[in-house]
Every structure is written in C-alpha cells, then in structure tokens.
Amino acid sequence: MLKDIDAFATLAVKNIDAAKSFYEGMLGLEPEGEDQSGMATYRSGSTRILMYESGFAGTNGANALTWGVGSQFDAIVQDLRDKGVSFEHYDDLPGLTLVGDVHVADDFKGVWFKDPDGNILHINSG
C-alpha cells in the first residue's frame, strides 16, 4: 500500500529558530518553501525533513536522523568538528570500537551527535 510513496522525516524541536540556526548553519541544510508558524521544512538529498515545535522534543533516546555519506565521511566529520559539534561516545555498542570520536568496525565508521534539543543525529560511512 505505501511501498511506492515517499515518506519524510518529522523532527520535534523546542525552539524552531534555534533549530533553524543549527540545521542551516552547522549542517548546511537549506529551507524548502515558506516557514509556517512553529514549523520549517528542509530537503536532504531526496528526503524532506519537517521540523515542528513540541514539548516532547529530544525525548527520544534513539537516532532521529541518519545520513549514510560513504567516502565523504572523514571530510564531513572534520567539517562538523571544525564548526564545534561535540560527538557522543558510546561504550555499549556491540562490535564497535571507539577511535577518537568515531565508532568503527571493519569498513564501518559512525558518529553520533545531538542537535540543540537533544535529538540524536547519526552519520555513517554506509
């Protein structure tokens, strides 16, 4: 029924202006269309990301957004580091070893970081 219809990510934020500053300034996303009161829409590749203000922002303890960036991984991580992004360090991820800020296993590399509302964002070499 839904397999051929595009879905989009929906992300709760506490303050839309702070979120816009982070997602545009730190991550380089560009707004798509006009903002609605308390909402903003972005495109990342072919994926739409809708952000809306909610008191429940940042309460999910799992990944909110994930990007598989392939061979661009090291450059993107360095760019985020240069912009002041702090990466999360997890000791309980089976099969992954922490090397600096990067969790690695064979050909896989991954980093996790949080937006201003505590939403967990993930970038990997996939």
Image: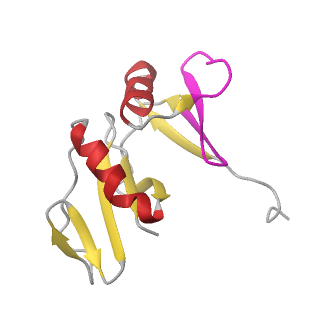
Residue projecting furthest to the right: 1
Q: How many marks?
A: 0
Please tell me in which quadrant of the rendered image residue 112 appears: bottom left
Q: Which residues are magenta?
A: 31-51
In the displayed structure, does residue 51 sit left or right of residue 5? left
78 magenta-colored: no
Residue 33, located in which quarter of the rendered image?
Answer: top right
- The vertical placement of 65 against 125, above or below, is above
Residue 100 coordinates in the image, percent (x, y): 14, 63
- Residue at point 27%, 74% (across, down): 104
- Asked which colour scheme the image uses, the reply is secondary structure
Where does residue 67 sit, x and y in percent of width and height?
A: 48, 56
Q: Quadrant of the N terminus?
A: bottom right
Position of residue 64 relative to residue 25, above or below, is below
Q: Residue at x 41, y 67 (%)?
A: 125
Residue 120 place in picture, x, y as percent: 35, 50
**Depth check: 16 or 54 in front?**
16
**Apparent side of residue 39 relative to residue 12 in the rendered image (left or right):** right
